[in-house]
Amino acid sequence: MAGPLLQAWGPGAALWSRAALRPLGLLAPPCRGAAGPGPGPGGEPLEENPFYGKYRHKIQQLRRSSPDVFESRMEKRNEVKKQPVGYSNQGEFIRCMEEKAEGLGTKTSKGGFTKDKTLDSILNVEMVKEKSAEEIKQIWNQYFSAKDTVYAVIPAEKFDLIWKRAQKCPSFLYALPRKEGYEFFVGQWSGTELHFTSLINIQTQGETAPSQLVLYHYPELQKEKGIVLMTAEMDSKFLVVHEAQCLANQVQLFYAADHSETYKLVETFNHRSSEFKYMSVIAELEQSGLGRELRAGQVSDKS
């Protein structure tokens, strides 16, 4: 059973999960030494990507079942080597994800995510309408305190800002600190759901890449109670709670940022992808302290 959780959205506040109560960085080193399928970005063998081990089975399966599709995607990856530093092909990924965004909310994903996950399936909405916002927050926190997941109660005005920006910029690239460096994840809004999948997953599976994390936002009580409830589901084969927590924290960091330069990264990713630089995300993450926090936990766990 999980202990009490701290959940707060406000100036300087971060999401907390059950993982916040124990040391972070419970990651095993990726598999190495297996036969790889060929070159990756910049021309290096794909198996040298430190996160190749997590996706090896799916990559090899694609190579066997659709060799032509596999080779085509590998050729696109190799084109990165010929492009200037800072160039990004994210525009292509964004278009692919936008094309399937409408279907994400109505289909059951390969990761076993709940189909049409409504607030009524979690909470008796009519009953809680008689309670105050603070009481609803306590009920929400108490319910999820025994579950290994990420959740939050978001102030209405904060969610308004996030939602307004999500309409203009539905996708973004997030960096997840690892012992080996950083793994990038693409987040795509589909209605009030925010779907995440790793960049290498998109590069190897294209538009068929399944979600690995979904954040569900429920604005049903926003006008009357001034709060938006959030919870999540994740594919435990690829992410654990403290990693999902880090990605969820970054949504607040980039979409609810008071600093215009931080949100400008989101705008650049969506509307000027050729100018987007991966390292800018990492720099912002480290400056915020989120990257250092996860790194410190990984070092502590390793020692």
Image (cartoon, rainbow, N blue to C red):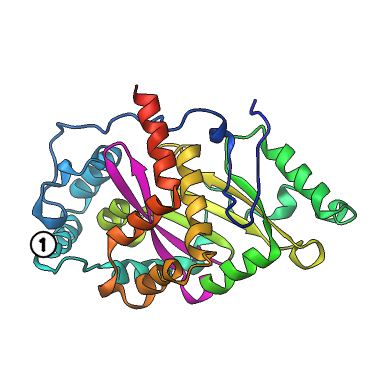
| Quadrant housing the C terminus | top left
Q: Is residue 125 left or right of 98 when viewed as pictured?
A: right
The reply to whether residue 124 is in sight is no
Residue drawn 32% across the image and 66% down it: 93
Q: Nearer the viewer, residue 178 or 191?
A: 178
Span highlighted in magenta in the image:
166-191
**Residue at 27%, 43% in the rendered image:** 181
* Residue 281 in view: yes
Nearest the eye: 297 or 137: 297
**Figure check: 99 above or below 81:** below
Residue 13 location in percent, x, y? 59, 51
Q: Quadrant of residue 146?
A: top right
Q: Quadrant of residue 139?
A: top right
Residue 287 x %, y %? 40, 53
Whether 188 is among the magenta residues is yes
Which residue is label 1 attached to? Answer: 81
Q: Is residue 175 magenta?
A: yes
Residue type of the residue flagged with mark 1: Lys
Helix, strand or loop status at disc 1: helix
Q: Badge 1: how crowded within 10 Å, few (<14), some, or many (20+)?
A: some
Q: Give x and y (percent) for residue 135.
A: 83, 47
Q: Is residue 266 above or below residue 69?
A: below
Q: With respect to residue 84, does 3 lie above or below?
A: above
Residue sitting at the far top: 303
Is residue 240 positioned above or below 173 on the image? Answer: above
Q: Position of residue 281 (x, y in %)?
A: 35, 59
Q: Main secondary structure of the magenta part?
A: strand
Point out the residue furthest to the right here.
130
Q: Residue at x 62, y 46 (%)?
A: 151
**Taking 205 as reference, is 148 left or right?**
right
Camera-side residue of 133 and 120: 133
Q: Residue at x 39, y 66 (%)?
A: 97
